[in-house]
């Protein structure tokens, strides 16, 4: 049975959180970001996002804490939009969206956001530093999720909708998701 839950995954810098907030606002749904939770967990431990990813390779409880929360939300909640690398896996009855993006544009977006607004437990003074940190983080996440659950978080065949956000505004991406979500529901 289809649930009134939309899960949004994607590559770093593709606009997962901003898109999820926009979709949630348009539908009057609750929004949850596991990325924000992970950043908070890192900050609480005095770690960067990259450092907590490496710690999670050895301390499986870090991922399990987030994953257990996602499983619980999937069972208990409705009217939810969640941005998360793994929520699509834990909420199989959700409308599953993957946001894709050219890696160079992703790096530029991430660097611009860090410079403009900052990001909890994530810092970089050059775009090259963002590239190195992002690559390490992606490799760590792919390795962990494969080792823990045999899930390839980059396999786009697992999703109901794939949107390239490279040359689209957040409003355009939100509109595409809303339109496709309505089709999926019917």
Image: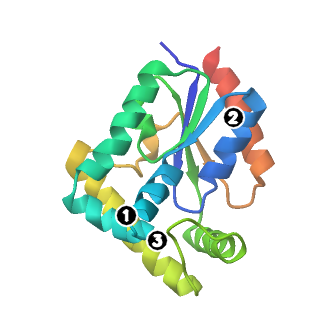
Disc 2 versus disc 3: nearer the observer: 2
- 20 or 40: nearer the viewer: 40
Task: Please report whichever mark, 1 or 3, sits nearer to the chain's N-terminal start.
Answer: 1
Question: Looking at the image, which residue is at 48% across and 56% down?
Answer: 40
Question: Looking at the image, which residue is at 63% across and 73% down?
Answer: 114
Residue 2 can be seen, yes or no: yes
Question: Looking at the image, which residue is at 58% across and 50% down?
Answer: 99
Residue beneath disc 1: 45
Question: Tag 2's secondary structure?
Answer: helix
Task: Please report whichever mark, 2 or 1, sits nearer to the chain's N-terminal start.
Answer: 2
Q: Residue 11 in the image: state x and y as whole percent.
A: 51, 58
Give the CA separation, mark 2 to mark 3: 27 Å
Residue beneath disc 2: 24
**Mark 2–mark 3 CB contact (< 8 Å):** no
Question: Looking at the image, which residue is at 60% across and 50% down?
Answer: 16
Give the CA separation, mark 2 to mark 1: 30 Å
Q: Residue 38 in the image: state x and y as whole percent.
A: 44, 54
Task: Please report whichever mark, 2 or 3, sits nearer to the chain's N-terminal start.
Answer: 2
Q: How many marks?
A: 3
Question: Tag 3's secondary structure?
Answer: helix
- In which quadrant will I find the C terminus? top right
Give the CA separation, mark 1 to mark 3: 20 Å
- 117 or 17: nearer the viewer: 117
Residue beneath disc 3: 134
């Amino acid at each position: 049975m289809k649930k009134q839950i939309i899960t949004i995954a994607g590559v770093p810098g593709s606009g997962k959180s901003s898109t999820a907030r926009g979709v949630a606002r348009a539908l009057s749904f609750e929004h949850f970001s596991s990325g924000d939770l992970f950043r908070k967990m890192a900050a609480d431990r005095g770690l960067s996002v990259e450092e907590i990813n490496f710690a999670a390779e050895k301390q499986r409880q870090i991922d399990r804490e987030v994953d257990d929360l996602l499983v619980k939300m999937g069972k208990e909640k409705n009217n939810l939009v969640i941005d998360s690398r793994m929520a699509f896996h834990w909420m199989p009855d959700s409308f599953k969206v993957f946001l894709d993006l050219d890696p160079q544009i992703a790096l530029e977006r991430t660097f611009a956001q860090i410079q403009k607004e900052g990001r909890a437990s994530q810092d970089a003074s050059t775009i090259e530093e963002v590239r190195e940190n992002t690559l390490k983080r992606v490799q760590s996440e792919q390795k962990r999720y494969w080792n823990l659950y045999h899930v390839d978080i980059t396999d786009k065949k697992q999703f109901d909708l794939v949107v390239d956000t490279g040359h689209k505004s957040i409003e355009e991406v939100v509109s595409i998701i809303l339109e496709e979500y309505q089709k999926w529901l019917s």
